[in-house]
Amino acid sequence: MEHNWTSDNLTSLQSHILAEEQKYEDATGEFSWILSAISLATKAIGNKVRCARIEDVVGEVGSENVQGEMQHKLDVISNELILRCLGDRDNVGILASEENETPFFLRKRTEGGKYAVLFDPLDGSSNIDVSVGVGTIFSVLRLPDGGTREDAILQKGNKQVAAGYVLYGSSTILVLTTGNGVNMFVLDQAIGSFVLVEAKLQIPNGNKTYSINEAYTARFSDGVQSYLEWAHQNNYSSRYIGSMVADVHRTLLKGGVFIYPPTSDKPEGKLRLMYEANPMAMIIEQAGGKATALGDRILDIHPTGLHERTSVVLGSTDQVDQFLKHTT
Ligand code: AHM
Ligand code: MG
């Protein structure tokens, strides 16, 4: 049998990151330590998600997080796993999670703490009980030399040095950008490694699909309602899982637009800027798409608080523009 070997036949996340780092003269390799911690933590979370029913870790724990939302058992477990894996890395200065009101200040810049990692440990966790895809979202910032600890975190999304998500779906997918395009990895359970399956992903135009919680229509602005009416008259299709990682992942691969607009009861929107909207916006832009908060580029928003919320409209450039025609 003819052997079809090429050097890029099997690339693990680890070797991909090392190869990327070698492109930079001053690279120290430290960054790869962060990504390997994320890889380890998300493999462990994925394992818990898959065994949720067996290990009886579905359902709520009975406490609320800082957002006033009920924490699920797996929210707490996932948060612990990420904190444990990343907290050990010498170059992680700050860790901030959706599940904790205040960030963990671990190491100062002068003590080697070069990066802040912000994350939503288990987004869409209310879907766990019915085995729908859920995910982890992360954003990596470089800590500035001076300034206050709060300033170190409250950086615009355009300062992110890396962003990604892991989708625990029918397969476990890791999507990552370090500002040089978007790469997609799949966890090969047999060897325990994330393997590169697609490099330099580009989000396609031309898919007439919107993703929005349409049950809230009466609470949307006139502009959003006008867009929906227009879409109904123009043969659009609707897809909404209610799990941001899964909805954004489909949008990234297939095209279309994902929308979480302000509602009359949530005028700021629901999704969190720093660890949900910003990382997704970086990924979508790096794949050639567009990410806005009803007109303003998400990555240019100056954050005022770790848990700040924003509206989100992201996806294929043509579909986002089509939506904005009705709302701006
Ligand atoms: P969570 O971080 O508490 O899980 O909430 C975020 C989730 C997103 O995954 C999803 O896009 C959204 O909430 C769905 O909200 P809704 O049920 O209002 O449509
Ligand atoms: Mg969440």
Image: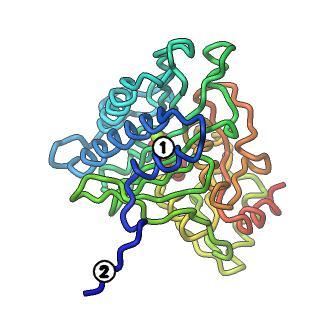
Foreground label between 1 and 2 = 2
Amino acid carrying label 2: it is His
232 left or right, relative to 110 = right
Residue at the spot of label 1? 137
- The image shows residue 301 at horizontal and vertical percentages of 74, 37
Identify the residue shown where x is 60% and y is 29%.
142
Identify the residue shown where x is 33% and y is 27%.
84
- The image shows residue 75 at horizontal and vertical percentages of 36, 36
Identify the residue shown where x is 55% and y is 44%.
163
Label 1: state its secondary structure: strand
Identify the residue shown where x is 33% and y is 63%.
170
Q: Is mark 1 within 8 Å of ligand 2?
A: yes
> In the picture shown, does residue 172 fall above or below 158?
below
Viewport quadrant of the N terminus: bottom left
Q: Residues within 10 Å of mark 2 (few under 14, many from 20)?
A: few
> In the picture shown, does residue 290 fall above or below 81?
below
Residue at the spot of label 2? 3
- The image shows residue 215 at horizontal and vertical percentages of 57, 58
